[in-house]
Image: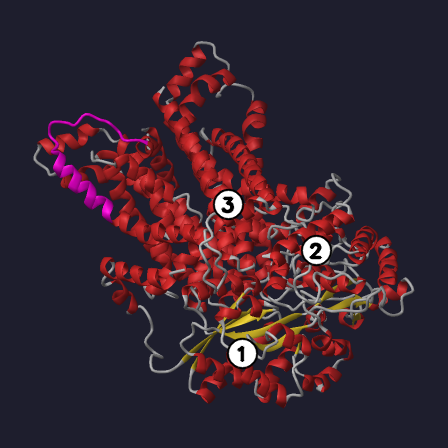
């Protein structure tokens, strides 16, 4: 499994045939291109960003070193706190739904029927269309005046009043969550489908012969075998969702009344919108420890799952 | 901060690690105009499409010929100007001339070149630059951070026949009567519509003047003392909450600058504060926009300024200016180009292509015959003259711009409309403003 | 699963599947309809009598024509494809090598390095783009495709490396050792024995990387300026959100046409994508 090496050194016995020297040099040369690219385009800007967050720099004005003042300032900022809460809520809810629906869809696809290849290719569309563009389509579907969703619900007799999708603070968050789920389900489904296909049908059959009911078969046979791939997919999805920017930026710009700000959109509004670069950097850096913690917990969990 | 030092270190590192890269990559660039000066102008995508077309096809080729330089026009969505400005300034390279909205001029004051000479010349020639434009584009000490370009006037566009039907023969000129008419119209399913969302044009264009007209203001004239928590502001918030329920389209909380146009054109609202684009659009496609009686819609649209409040009548319009960036290596060429654009004959082409959507910032144009061509557009001719800038009664400086970019005033009303008690939402705005003004 | 009455099959499989497909694809149907709908029909409020949202009787090609005649949409498509393809190749190259080293070679700090590469994936883009703009200027990459080709790998390499590591680990060691006994060098064994086996994994990493670069918005907005250099997401939004009145027709046409190339790539490779991913998670 992939992530073991990420989180710790793999101690495998050194086979007779390998010469240690040889391996070190090879490893070094194989890692060089990656190190150069990441070093130049991530390590340095990251360092620069961290430095920036500890100064009083505004756009076009180099600031003084102020230590952790910016972090102190955002900590006392009510909008920042809202953004933190929003980000957790957004990430948590979407991940649960994406996982549940993705798993369901994967199970539906994991059997033979006519047009399977076609369906499988088609359902990936939400995942592959540029986010900016699909989000604009959603924005129009949520338009208070022209919403096709409202039209449909109205025609079906479900609503008599229009639903103010993006205008109501709670609904606005829900709308954003819906779009994120819509975008993420295909990725979950296809990846979990890949996992499902590695599980040999004989195991299922054996369990069925032993008299296990479908639900029991899923819980005791399929789920444990699927867990590793599930965790990895969740891990990647959480990272992407936590740092999400485009979706909120386009749908609401963080409004109404800051009800939908996430880390990234708030950092953008402060850093770019008001020119307080250092504070914006501090906000986006504040995301890092949270994300790091979540990821470490997940990685540890994955390791435990694998080694048991 | 030792910016430059690190930059050079990086250059060194880059030089050794990526030795040939710059060279290889350089070949990918077009050498065509290597000898010629190039001016790169970044502006918004004009809300009147004909103008950008006119620039590309007519005016800029002419400028290239007259000035012997190459002009690169780049247009981006108005909301995307800021990331480009920030990246340009921080990296020290980018467009030579960038369009500014409102007080961006103050926000980026350290990164632009003074264009006072040009502003004074144009002002002298054209009967003086309006105070509103001066306040936004200059620092009050003779330095012009941006060359005032134009004002996108915000006026209320309304449906004459619908207002007639409820007995309002002209657009209400006080907030009380505004509320009354709105109430009657909403009862008929034709509310007034306004955005309280996070959007740069129509939201502050409504909320700031509304607040001022009640006597509310962000700070005292010293530009330091936050005085928003006043009875006047609280009253205005309370009134807004009631107004919203009684007479406004409640979808407005989510609108951006485009929603009210579509709502108006599709006949779901009877009045909204906007640039002239609604009317212009209805003129362009008379067959498409018809009233419920089959008349062309454009015959049923009129414009009016925002109503008066206890403290007077105000307007806040989007003011655009052009900034010559300090990092630019073509500052002289850029100034030359700007000066060329402001030659009367050239500027007139722009002005006429806008058909009244844009109001010039100098007195001379107020009496232009273009305003007589269509009486519906006439109210816009004084937009630039009557405007007031955010940060009132203080100067429209970087702090005022910060308050504007954080949507504090708009959010103050939005919060109340969503159910927060008026006193509390004003208190919230006060604490946010204090953070800005005490820093 | 196979047994059971026909109705059960419908209730438990077919109907949910149809619902899924319907919901996932509905926005695309909406884009198609909008693309071909004349402007006059576009703006009718949701509760209007004559509102006919799901069909149009007067299809028009105006929006698509507008897209190609009035904007450089064709150019944007070519740019986006070029940038996505080259940055994908670079990231795959780096990712495959690094993944191999981290998964199959024994050297000090392998774990630490792996973690470091993974952590770079966590650094928020919003923090990076301003310092990056400076670097782009120093290397004089501004307004060239290379600005994106060289920065996109920063978020593609970690993913590719991670995926390939998993895949390489799943390949039995004996395979390599046999080749080594036959006298092949370690490097040769890697190139000729391991890489061919890993092709499905490389494919799926590549497809994923391609999608991410096709999607990217912020860097493309900041680092490119000439209209003819732009990518589809930036071009479409910055040139088609024109005016505060109309843009949905061409915008949706752009969205639709902009996703077709990736859709085609996927329809060919979805099989590999699935099996590649399978390989990487099997280990």
Front residue (pair C265, B396): B396
Q: Residue furthest right?
A: B167
Secondary structure category for the residue under label 2: loop
Find the magenta span and give its range: A8-32
Mark closer to the chain start, 2 or 1: 1
**Residue C254, percent from left and from top:** 51, 59
Q: Confirm or deny contact between disc 1 and disc 3 (CB under 8 A).
A: no
Q: Residue furthest left?
A: C183
Kindly identify which numbered label has been placed on residue B55.
1
Secondary structure category for the residue under label 3: helix
Quarter that holds the C terminus of chain A: top left
Give the chain letter at badge 3: A
The reply to whether residue C52 is in sight is no
Image-based side of A298 in relation to C178, left or right:
right
Which residue has dot 2 on it? B196
Residue appearing at x 56%, y 52% in the figure: A249
**Residue C39, percent from left and from top:** 64, 63
Q: CA distance from mark 1 to mark 3?
A: 38 Å
Which residue has dot 3 on it? A126
């Amino acid at each position: 499994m992939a992530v073991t090496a990420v989180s710790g050194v793999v101690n495998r016995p050194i086979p007779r045939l390998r010469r240690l020297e040889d391996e070190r040099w090879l490893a070094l040369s194989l890692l060089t291109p990656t190190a150069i690219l990441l070093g130049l385009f991530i390590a340095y800007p990251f360092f620069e960003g961290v430095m920036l967050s500890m100064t009083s720099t505004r756009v076009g004005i180099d600031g003084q070193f102020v230590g952790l003042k910016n972090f102190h300032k955002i900590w006392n900022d009510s909008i920042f706190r809202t953004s933190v809460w929003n980000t957790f809520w957004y990430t948590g809810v979407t991940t649960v739904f994406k996982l549940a629906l993705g798993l369901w869809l994967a199970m539906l696809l994991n059997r033979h029927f006519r047009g399977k290849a076609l369906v499988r290719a088609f359902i990936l569309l939400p995942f592959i269309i540029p986010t900016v563009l699909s989000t604009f389509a959603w924005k129009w579907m949520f338009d208070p005046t022209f919403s096709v969703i409202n039209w449909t619900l109205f025609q079906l007799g479900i609503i008599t009043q229009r639903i103010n999708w993006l205008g109501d603070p709670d609904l606005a968050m829900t709308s954003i969550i819906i779009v994120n789920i819509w975008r993420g389900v295909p990725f979950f489904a296809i990846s979990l489908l890949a996992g499902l296909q590695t599980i040999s049908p004989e195991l299922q059959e054996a369990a069925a012969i032993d008299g296990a009911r479908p639900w029991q078969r899923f819980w005791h046979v399929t789920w444990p075998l699927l867990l590793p791939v599930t965790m990895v997919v969740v891990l990647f999805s959480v990272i992407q969702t936590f740092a999400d920017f485009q979706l909120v930026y386009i749908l609401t710009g963080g409004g109404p009344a800051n009800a939908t700000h996430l880390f990234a959109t708030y950092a953008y509004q402060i850093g770019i919108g008001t020119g307080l670069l250092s504070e914006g950097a501090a906000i986006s850096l504040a995301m890092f420890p949270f994300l790091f913690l979540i990821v470490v917990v997940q990685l540890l969990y994955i390791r435990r799952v694998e080694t048991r | 901060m030792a910016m430059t030092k690190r930059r050079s270190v990086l250059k060194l590192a880059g030089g050794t690690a990526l030795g040939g890269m710059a060279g290889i990559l350089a070949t990918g660039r077009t050498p065509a105009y290597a000898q010629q000066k190039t001016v790169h102008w970044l502006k918004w995508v004009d809300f009147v499409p004909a103008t950008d077309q006119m620039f590309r096809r007519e005016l800029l080729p002419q400028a290239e010929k007259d000035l012997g330089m190459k002009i690169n026009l780049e247009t981006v969505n108005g909301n995307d100007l800021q990331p480009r400005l920030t990246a340009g300034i921080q990296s020290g390279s980018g467009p030579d001339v960038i369009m500014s909205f409102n007080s961006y001029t103050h926000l980026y004051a350290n990164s632009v070149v003074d264009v006072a000479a040009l502003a004074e010349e144009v002002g002298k020639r054209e009967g003086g630059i309006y105070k509103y434009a001066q306040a936004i584009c200059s620092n009050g000490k003779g330095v012009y951070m941006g060359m005032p370009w134009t004002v996108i006037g915000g006026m209320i566009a309304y449906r004459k026949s619908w207002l007639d039907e409820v007995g309002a023969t002209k657009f209400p000129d006080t907030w009380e009567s505004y509320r009354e008419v709105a109430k009657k119209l909403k009862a008929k399913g034709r509310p007034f519509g306004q955005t309280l969302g996070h959007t740069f044009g129509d939201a502050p264009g409504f909320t700031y003047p509304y607040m001022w007209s009640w006597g509310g203001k962000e700070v005292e004239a010293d530009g330091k003392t936050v005085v928003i928590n006043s009875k006047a502001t609280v009253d205005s918030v309370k009134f807004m909450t009631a107004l919203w329920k009684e007479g406004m389209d409640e979808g407005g909380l989510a609108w951006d600058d485009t929603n009210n146009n579509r709502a108006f054109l599709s006949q779901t609202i009877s009045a909204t504060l906007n640039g002239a684009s609604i009317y212009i659009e209805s003129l362009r496609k008379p067959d498409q926009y018809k009233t419920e009686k089959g008349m062309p819609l454009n015959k049923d649209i009129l414009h009016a300024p925002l109503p008066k409040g206890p403290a007077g009548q105000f307007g806040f319009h989007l003011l655009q200016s052009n900034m010559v960036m300090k990092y630019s290596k073509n500052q002289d060429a850029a100034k030359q180009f700007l000066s060329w654009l402001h030659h009367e004959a050239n500027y007139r082409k722009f002005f006429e292509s806008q058909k009244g959507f844009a109001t010039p910032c100098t007195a001379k144009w107020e009496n232009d015959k273009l305003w007589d061509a269509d009486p519906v557009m006439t109210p816009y001719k004084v937009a630039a003259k009557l405007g007031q800038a955010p940060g009132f009664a203080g100067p429209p400086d970087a702090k005022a711009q910060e308050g504007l970019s954080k949507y504090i005033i708009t959010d103050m009303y939005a919060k109340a409309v969503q159910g927060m008690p008026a006193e509390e939402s004003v208190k919230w705005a006060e604490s946010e403003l204090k953070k800005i003004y005490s820093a | 699963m196979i047994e059971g009455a026909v109705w059960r099959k419908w209730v438990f499989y077919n109907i949910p599947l149809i619902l899924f497909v319907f919901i996932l694809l509905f926005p695309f149907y909406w884009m198609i309809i909008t693309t071909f709908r004349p402007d006059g029909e576009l703006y009718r409020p949701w509760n209007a009598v004559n509102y006919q949202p799901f069909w149009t009787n007067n299809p028009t090609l105006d929006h698509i024509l507008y897209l190609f005649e009035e904007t450089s949409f064709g150019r944007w498509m070519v740019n986006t494809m070029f940038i996505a393809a080259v940055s994908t190749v670079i990231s795959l190259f780096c990712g495959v090598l690094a993944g191999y080293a981290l998964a199959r070679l024994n050297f000090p700090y392998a774990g630490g390095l792996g973690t470091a590469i993974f952590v770079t994936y966590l650094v928020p883009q919003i923090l990076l783009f301003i310092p990056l703009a400076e670097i782009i200027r120093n290397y004089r990459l501004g307004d060239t495709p290379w600005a994106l080709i060289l920065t996109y790998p920063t978020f593609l390499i970690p993913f590719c490396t991670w995926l390939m590591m998993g895949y390489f680990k799943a390949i039995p060691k004996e395979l390599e050792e046999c080749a080594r006994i036959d006298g092949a060098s370690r490097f040769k064994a890697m190139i000729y024995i391991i890489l061919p086996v890993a092709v499905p994994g490389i494919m799926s990493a590549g497809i994923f990387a391609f999608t991410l670069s096709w999607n990217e918005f912020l860097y493309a907005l900041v680092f490119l300026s000439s209209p003819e250099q732009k990518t589809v997401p930036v071009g479409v939004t910055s040139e088609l959100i024109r005016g505060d009145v109309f843009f949905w027709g061409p915008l949706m046409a752009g969205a639709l046409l902009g996703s077709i190339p990736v859709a085609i790539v996927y329809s060919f490779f979805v099989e590999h994508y699935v099996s590649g991913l399978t390989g990487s998670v099997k280990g």
